[in-house]
Image (spheres, rainbow, N blue to C red):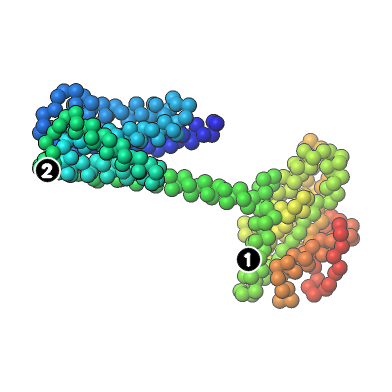
Amino acid sequence: MNNSIHKGLSYARRMYLPRTVGLGIGFFSVAAAVYPSHPPAWVWALMLFHGYGWPHVAYQLARFSSQPYQAERRTLIYDSLAGGFWAGAMGFNPLPTVTALSMMAMNNIAAGGPRLFVLGCIAQLAGSAVGYWILTPVLFPDVTQIQIYACLPMLVIYPLAIGLVCYRVAVQLSRSKKALEKLSTTDSLTGLMNHGAWKDLLTVEFNNCQTLNRQNSVALIDIDHFKSINDTYGHIIGDNVLKQLGGALTASLRETDLAGRYGGDEFCVILPDTTLAQAGEILERLRRTVHEHTHSALPNLKLSLSIGIAAYGPHLTDAGMWLHEADMALYDAKSTGRNRVTSAQPGVKTALMVR
């Protein structure tokens, strides 16, 4: 409910600018068209209120409504009804009438699409009949030079206001889209790439290696005895350990390296333009950093990493085979004592073991 109210108020705020600008400058085109018929004082008072008071009243109606979105939609219909009234009041003077009603129609279709456009047109017709019936002006009077000049601000400034609002909406949508894309590719706990996003990048890097003959390495990282950490200290500490490793990866790796959380306590890294030896040096530094780190709240908790690395080679047929080599190197690291970095031997086939 609160989210709905927030969206409704945001919608009302977006409409506030074009309504204020449109009615403020529209006053002059209507006044220039109505003046020759010498209307009574109440018409001028109503015209002034509609041009300079109604935008603020309309916004307050939406602001204090329990359903601001619906209140603003009703206000847009009232705008069309009032626009039609002034068209009838000036005897359907061609230029001011077309200018005012077309600008309102543009506003309606920008704010609510075809449905609001149709409802607005119906309201304009009803308002036109009422305005003409009450004031009975001369029908279709000649357009004067003053009326032409009075319509120019509406034709120039109001479309700019609508364009500004649409631009702001487009910018906000673009930001929201980027935020959603980031959420869909980011692991919420560590802030690294999630499994799916990292696997997609692995395929891209594999294809680049094939076409560009690049040197590239991939690594799988596993926290040793992570289950016992959860069992001994609890899952909150376990989550904290995962966050710390995510931070250590970000701090220790190069800007070009692509780190992700593969799943559970396993992490993954792509190291572009890196030989097996270079990758080994980078990840050995990471292993030492993590192993030497002391947890402030739990000084007895010591972490260690087992890391398997595989370099790209022409013997690889797909990204899955490349990842499998890194997985086998990781298994070797774990089976030979853990807390070490092991490099895959290209072309050596190893049976897949369950860890």
Residue 260 occupies which quadrant of the picture?
Answer: bottom right
Q: What residue is rendered at 45% in x and 34% in y?
A: 69
Q: Is residue 14 above or below residue 183?
A: above
Q: How many marks?
A: 2
- On the rendered image, what quadrant is the C terminus found in? bottom right
Q: Residue at 62%, 56% (x, y): give it.
A: 255
Depicted 109 relative to depicted 325: above or below? above
Q: Is residue 165 visible?
A: no
In x, y percent, where is residue 76?
A: 35, 35
Q: Is residue 262 visible?
A: yes
Q: CA distance from mark 1 to mark 2?
A: 66 Å
Q: Which residue is mark 2?
A: 143
Which comes before the other along the chain, label 1 or label 2?
2
The disc placed on residue 165 is none
Determine which residue is flagged by label 1. Answer: 204
Q: Secondary structure at mark 1?
A: helix
Dividing the picture into quarters, in which one does residue 278 lie?
Answer: bottom right
Q: Amino acid at mark 2?
A: Val
Element under label 2? Answer: loop
Nearest-to-viewer mark from 1 and 2: 2
Asked where in the image residue 299 lies, by quadrant, the reply is: top right
